[in-house]
Image: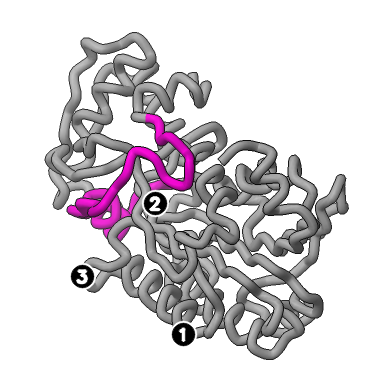
Amino acid sequence: MNEQNLASKLSGQKILLVGGSGFIGGSVLRKLTNQNCEISVLSRKERNTEKNVKYIKADLLDPESLKKALDDKYDILIQSVQFSGHPVERPWLGKSHTYEGFDAQGTENLIKAISESKAKNSLKQYIYLSGAGADLDIDYPWTRAKKRAEKAIRESGVSFTIFRPSWVYGKGDQSMSKFVLFAKYLPFFPVIGNGKAPVNPLWVEDLSQIIVNSILHPQALNQTINVGSLPELNMKQVSQIVLDYVGNRNKPIICHPKPLMKLAGVFAQFIPISPLSPNSVEFLTMDVHLKDLKKKVFDVQINGLQDGLEKSGLK
């Protein structure tokens, strides 16, 4: 899709972006601000309106604030949110720090607010960022939450597009940027588990452009779409690519047994910025093989990891 066609399609559309201050949502927002559409961003923090972006203070876990936020007609809703500290749940800080308490319950609250709002009859498309493995038959907090959220959206009566991206990386992320630091400064590269966990790393700029291009695309409506780069890699291969990227290709890659890392996570989860907990170890080592991946999605040619890293400027 060329820029002219995209601009024509988005012209005059009223878009509500839930999670526009986050890593993925922020990238989507930057692409939308170049278009002739009206953008409202739902945010938990008070923000100043800028350019053609209107910020609305609301919280997914506060139904009353959602009712006020949806007191308008919107054509498109894009939801890309995640709780603070993901993938480490901290239930002792409240349900807003868990998958089911924030992602699942928050989505259900949003769906209910839509059903009682002016947006109910105006929404043409609900775009939701789920994740790889949401369809797995395993009882993890993450999969339970994603299944609940996806179910609520499918049953809402609104045309939807659900994306299940693999590991998303880029400037400002909380994962690949750490990998780059490990590769640059540690004497070895640490990997959780046996290094065989499959992954299809996806550059955030590719994902956000796919999301924007999917708006009102006939082939996107009422579809659940896996997105990720090809070929599929395992974590050892990802580690080697990152080492090559920073110029330290000969550093050893050392795998840390999963049971040992889960034990470490029992204590590490209480450190405010720790990326480790028993459940996060399970999350990071899930055996997820994405099906029906395509190298080009909604006119976006997906970069492989090597090219994506070079373009991301993570160094």
Where does the image place residue 127, in percent across and percent down from the top left? 54, 64
Report the mark closest to the observer, 3 or 1: 1
Q: Is residue 38 left or right of residue 201?
A: right
Q: Is residue 282 left or right of residue 58?
A: left
Which of the labelled discs sits on residue 138, or is there none?
3
The residues colored magenta run 274-303
Task: Estimate how packed mark 3 is, as few (under 14), some (14 to 19) or many (20 or more) residues with alpha carbons within 10 Å.
Answer: few
* Element type at mark 2: strand
Residue at (47% x, 81% y) in the render = 152
Where does the image place residue 257, in percent across and percent down from the top left? 13, 43
Task: Estimate how packed mark 2 is, as few (under 14), some (14 to 19) or many (20 or more) residues with alpha carbons within 10 Å.
Answer: many
Where does the image place residue 50, in percent across and percent down from the top left? 86, 47
Residue 266 appears in the picture as rendered: no
Residue at (35% x, 22% y) in the render = 306
Q: To which residue does mark 1 refer?
A: 155
Report the mark closest to the observer, 2 or 3: 2
Which of the labelled discs sits on residue 165, or is there none?
2
- Measure the alpha-carbon separation of dots 2 and 3: 18 Å
| Amino acid type, residue under disc 1 in the picture | Glu
Report the mark closest to the observer, 2 or 1: 1
As for residue 289 lying within the magenta part, the answer is yes
* Element type at mark 1: loop
Residue at (45% x, 68% y) in the render = 98
| Amino acid type, residue under disc 3 in the picture | Ile
- Measure the alpha-carbon separation of dots 3 and 1: 22 Å
Using the image as rendered, state which of residue 29 and residue 213 is in the foreground: 213
Mark sitting earlier along the chain (2/1): 1
As for residue 116 lying within the magenta part, the answer is no
* Element type at mark 3: loop
| Amino acid type, residue under disc 2 in the picture | Pro
